[in-house]
Amino acid sequence: MEIIDNNYSKKRIIECVVFVMQKPLRNYAFIDSQNVNLGIRDLGWKLDWNKFRIYLKEKYGVATAYMFIGYMEENQDLYLSLQKDGYILIFKEILKNKDGFVKGNCDAELVLQAMVDYQKYSKAVIVSGDGDFACLVRHLRKQGKLEKVLVPNSRKYSALLKKVAAEEYLDCMNNLKGKLFYKPHTTKNSTNSAQRKAPNKDRTSKGSFRRDSARRVSKFKRRVNANRNRNFQTGI
């Protein structure tokens, strides 16, 4: 007689359901980093790129995420961090105008990479609100290769994208702050230290008034005791 472990059976059923519900990781994401940065900044928050990479994987089944970004020598730490988060970086040499404004337009590189890897991915996720990608989006949609166009800011994106992608293929990041907001990591000790050192309105450190008051009281007691001893010695 075969003994059936009910707990094991339930566990296997749950695992099978989860496997079926998960999106297969066959999609590629092509991310216009400058457009994303500017769009999210206009919304008043900062994107956590590590959380975003996980979001792309879980929401859209993204196996490979290309990020197209301007190259600056002083940003080496940023590039290493993004690579650790799971992005493949495609660099574009930046240009500075006479006013010092940095321009690193990677539109051509993004379109080219989407075509180079065309046979490797099931569908593409285009992360940008730039209308220059309208022709790419139109082609991918026509060929059944478009998963989504993910727009950073629904208040500021090209009408061309809206036209060629249609509502069915458009998602926006406006309501994702709770999931993808970057929150600096602080330790408990550093927080307590900062609280202790935080200045009051009069620019004195918290607790300094108490310390000064204690010193004045102690000084006053010493003076009283000294006067009392002097009076006792003189017989007053």
Image (tube, grey):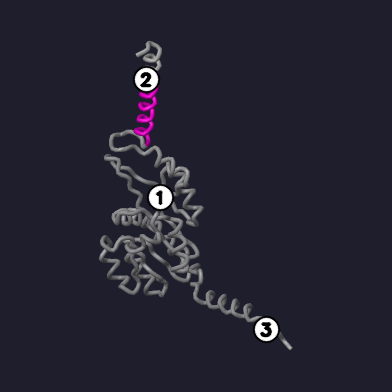
Which amino acid type is marked by label 2? Arg
Please give the name of the residue rendered at 56% of the width and 77% of the height, measured from the top-left corner: 14
**Sequence-first tag of 2 and 3:** 3
Chain part drawn in magenta: 207-225
| Mark seen at residue 17 | none
Examine the image and state in which quarter residue 219 appears: top left
Which label sits in the foreground, 3 or 1? 3
SS at badge 2: helix
Q: Which residue is mark 2?
A: 223
* In the foreground, 84 or 194: 194
For marks 3 and 1, give the CA distance.
Answer: 60 Å
Which amino acid type is marked by label 1? Lys
Q: Count the marks: how many?
A: 3
Mark 1, other Cα within 10 Å: few <14 / some 14–19 / many ≥20: some
| Mark seen at residue 4 | 3
Residue 47: percent from left, percent from top: 38, 55
Mark 3, other Cα within 10 Å: few <14 / some 14–19 / many ≥20: few
Please give the name of the residue rendered at 37% of the width and 70% of the height, measured from the top-left corner: 139
Mark 2, other Cα within 10 Å: few <14 / some 14–19 / many ≥20: few
* In the foreground, 211 or 199: 211
Tell me: 88 left or right of 231: right
Per the picture, the main secondary structure of the magenta-coloured stretch is helix
Residue 160: percent from left, percent from top: 27, 66
Which label sits in the foreground, 2 or 1? 2
Tell me: 196 left or right of 44: right
Please give the name of the residue rendered at 41% of the width and 52% of the height, measured from the top-left corner: 183
Residue 134: percent from left, percent from top: 32, 65
Please give the name of the residue rendered at 37% of the width and 20% of the height, measured from the top-left corner: 223
Quarter in which the N terminus is drawn = bottom right
In the rendered view, would you say 52 is above or below 186?
below
For marks 2 and 1, give the CA distance.
Answer: 75 Å
Q: Which residue is mark 1?
A: 92
